[in-house]
Amino acid sequence: MKFARIAALVTALSLPFAAFAQGEESQESAESTAPRLVVAIAVDQLSADIFAQHRQNFTGGFARMLQGAVFPSGYQAHAATETCPGHSTILTGAHPGRTGVIANRWFDMGVAREDVRVYCSEDPGVEGSSSSDYTVSTGNLLVPTLGDLMQRVDEASQVVSVAGKDRSAVMLGGANADRMFWPGDAGFTTFEGRDLPEAVTWINQAAGRAMASSRVPLPVPQQCAAYNRAIPVGEDATVGTHVFSRGPATSGRTILASPEGDLLTLNLAADLVSELGLGQGETTDLLAIGLASTDYIGHAYGTHGVEMCVQLMALDAMLGDFFARLDARGISYVAMLTADHGGLDLPERQTGQAAPRAARLLPGFETLDARLAEETGLEAPILRADGPFGDFYVDRSVPEDRRAEVIDRAIALISAHPQVYRVYGRDEIMAQPVTDAPPEHWTVLDRVRANFHPDRSGDFIVVLQPRVTPIPQAIPGAYVATHGSVWDYDRRVPILFWWPGADHVEQPLGVMTVDILPTLASLIGLDISDIEIDGRCLDLMPDVAASNCP
């Protein structure tokens, strides 16, 4: 077995499966200096904060990426720091206001169904579809991805996207990906009518064995021991000492909310490289990988406890072995690693770590519709929203001649909440030009504007105060912490580039995830001069006489 280090990791973590490689790897040398494979990796909820917190302990794949071009303070510059909009920026070069992917879910008052909420990677035109029971589609993404642009130049380029969430796979892969895989009810799946490669069948069998197995808690590495402290969340529950011990899994989420989820995804990606011959033809291929476990773990346990430390140490080792497998095939590749957003630790831990103003959401939003109904005489629902912040919409039942009145009253009521920072109306947002300033200097309105699409965004946007967790009560084992705000703990992410022979360069100033597309395009010689984007090419060469940017 060639995945020796992953085998060691699996043994150390007491995971139920250890062998993933589907055969002997061939030693092939790349004849061209141009990379034959682009590997784009998005680690869901890998904030710049937790990356910096554990950086000194990385020895595997993260350590390799840190040997190349390092931007430790990259930005998902926009306001809605959620999975779908974040992933939509990474390989498009466009802010959500251009990609059209403004949130994980938004509301469309013109959709011909009772559920007017639209999921970001659903096809709302499918009969019987809803935002929770949907057919996966790429149709909501309004701009091309790197893979789409590569195939525009050469149809022989293979584009493969594999991720721990359907929305991650869709937003990274784009409209024309040859292969796209995400977890379904019975393991990794794809679009209806498309065949599943042997690699998918094999990995799903391994996942089935994992779900049926019991194990003891994972060992706590020495570098994680300092985080192994119980934090009360609720009357009888704690986080901070639960290192993924469980009996047989009751759902796929149990697997995803542990290092096993990323282990499955990375091994599927590596097996697809072998089975599909990625990076071994005459053209450049793209492999996009969305790793979801860091996000599930951040939600279930918070971002600064032992669970996250164990996850990142495991992921570091797994990424190292994934790269080693590419090396063993002699593939000429360039790798990029970033995140779709950051995250905020649970307030119960923050208040003991020099953040006394951290708090959960106070009451008020749950009665908003009732108060509006009382004041206006209209029947609920009057407003539509997917939570206590972000986009708010006036329901289609409100008469046109009363919409302005409803918006004014709603903004007044919401602005009076003590944890609301500001409410921005549509006219104010649209009057603000999209800035080209460095992302660390953006105003909150700049962030909201970059996220705003006139056909999909709300009638007004609510921004909560910093360090407010919009979960009124923790749900142990599921949701104790979250992300999504306009604040830097959710916006800042690492952006890393590496290729064989890359010189190390580190730039601590702010760059953006929309800069990734033009940078990767420059490295593979792809002309994108006719594409309107929001990003710019990043010069990755430390020699002032050389530049990868056109």
Image (cartoon, rainbow, N blue to C red):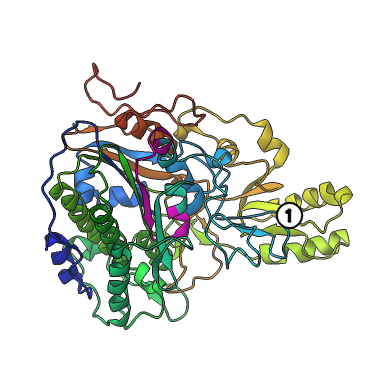
The tally of labels here is 1
Residue 269 can be seen, yes or no: yes
The quadrant of the picture occupied by the N terminus is: bottom left
User: Magenta segment, which residues?
Assistant: 150-169
* Residue 452, picture quadrant: top right
Residue at horizontal 20%, vertical 33%?
Answer: 504
Residue 31 position (above or below residue 112): above
Q: Position of residue 416 (x, y in %)?
A: 70, 53
Badge 1 is on which residue? Answer: 109
Residue 57 can be seen, yes or no: no
Decide if residue 97 is on the left or right side of residue 168: right
Q: Position of residue 455 (x, y in %)?
A: 68, 43
Residue 217 position (above or below residue 496): below
* Residue 23, picture quadrant: bottom left
The quadrant of the picture occupied by the C terminus is: top left
Whether residue 387 is in magenta: the answer is no
Q: Please tell me which residue lies in front, 245 or 90.
A: 90
The disc labelled 1 sits on which kind of residue? Met
Q: Position of residue 205 (x, y in %)?
A: 30, 74
Decide if residue 265 is on the left or right side of residue 147: left
Residue at horizontal 38%, vertical 48%?
Answer: 339
Q: Position of residue 390 (x, y in %)?
A: 61, 51
Whether residue 154 is in magenta: the answer is yes
Residue at horizontal 58%, vertical 68%?
Answer: 133
Q: Please tell me which residue lies in front, 403 or 353.
A: 403
Decide if residue 89 is on the left or right side of residue 394: left
Secondary structure under the numbered disc 1 in the rendered image: loop
